[in-house]
Amino acid sequence: MSVPLLSPSVRTAAMTLAAAAAVFFVLAMTTHGVLVPAVLAVAFVAASLVRQATGGGGAEAASQVPAPAVWIPEAPKPEPEPAPELAAEPVVVPAPVVVPAPERPEPVAAEPAASEPATREPRPEPPVAADPDGALVLLVEDDDALRRFTARLLERAGYQVLQARAGAEALEVAPGQQLRALVTDVVMPRMSGHELAQRLLADNPGLAVIYTSGYTEDTISRHGIDRERVAFLQKPFQSAQLIDALSRALAA
């Protein structure tokens, strides 16, 4: 381990102090010890300088001297490998889709409208009575829809029609009328068709009577009707059946 050397000026000063210390020491010994402490102090300082000059303080000086830098070569950095080149995929451009224009339908000449829709068949006209002669018929039915339908049917067949919803109403419209026939329901509220016919026959013995009903034969029998002895139509009945029964009753 190398010891740093002092500068020439420091070494010269140290040698001078050492020589001075020796001289003072000799003088001190000859002057009975009066200057002994001072000489000892100078000698201690000179000894310190001499020890530093000769290498005694080299440890501290060596600790203050920086160690020489050691150069360590850096390992060469690997060069990055070039990225593999990707083959460019060809860009496929779809061909334009040609949509044909819709064909316009050729105009079709409108057919002349028929007088009657093809799906609606005209109702067959009811058969005309053999000799209606405008006979007046009293129609008694508590079902309003059925009564209106039957009245139109009789009117198209050439009859005149008086309508009533019940027996009491029929007795109100009958007086003073030239009734030729009575078409009545059997089962009605407050007054049955058989009772109504009996009261009208009392004033008009030649009145033709036709009974209609949707009830069973037992129910009709309890209302005094004998289907074998009177003109009777079971509901529902056909238009031709009503006109035929009325024509027979008037001809009897």
Image (cartoon, rainbow, N blue to C red):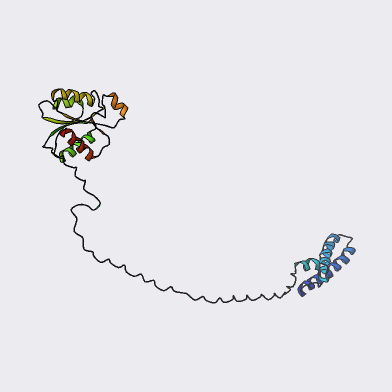
Q: Nearer the viewer, residue 237 or 5?
A: 237
Q: Position of residue 120 (x, y in %)?
A: 24, 50
Where's the C terminus, which quadrant?
top left
Q: From the viewer's perspective, is 84 left or right of 237?
A: right
Q: Is residue 67 above or below residue 219?
A: below
Q: Quadrant of residue 156?
A: top left
Give the residue displayed 79% in from the left and 65% down from the top.
Answer: 60
* Number of numbered discs overlaid on the protein picture: 0
Give whichever of 124, 31 is nearer the camera: 124
Q: Quadrant of residue 218?
A: top left
User: Is 198 situated left or right of 53 in this image?
Assistant: left
| Residue 171 position (above or below residue 80) | above
Residue at the image point whose x is 78% and y is 68% from the top: 62
Task: Say which quarter of the image contains residue 69.
Answer: bottom right
The residue nearer to you, when weighing 79 against 130, is: 130
**Residue at figure coordinates x 18%, y 35% from the top left:** 248
Q: Position of residue 102 (x, y in %)?
A: 31, 67
Q: Residue at x 77, y 66 (%)?
A: 63
User: Can you say which quadrant of the picture contains the N terminus?
Assistant: bottom right
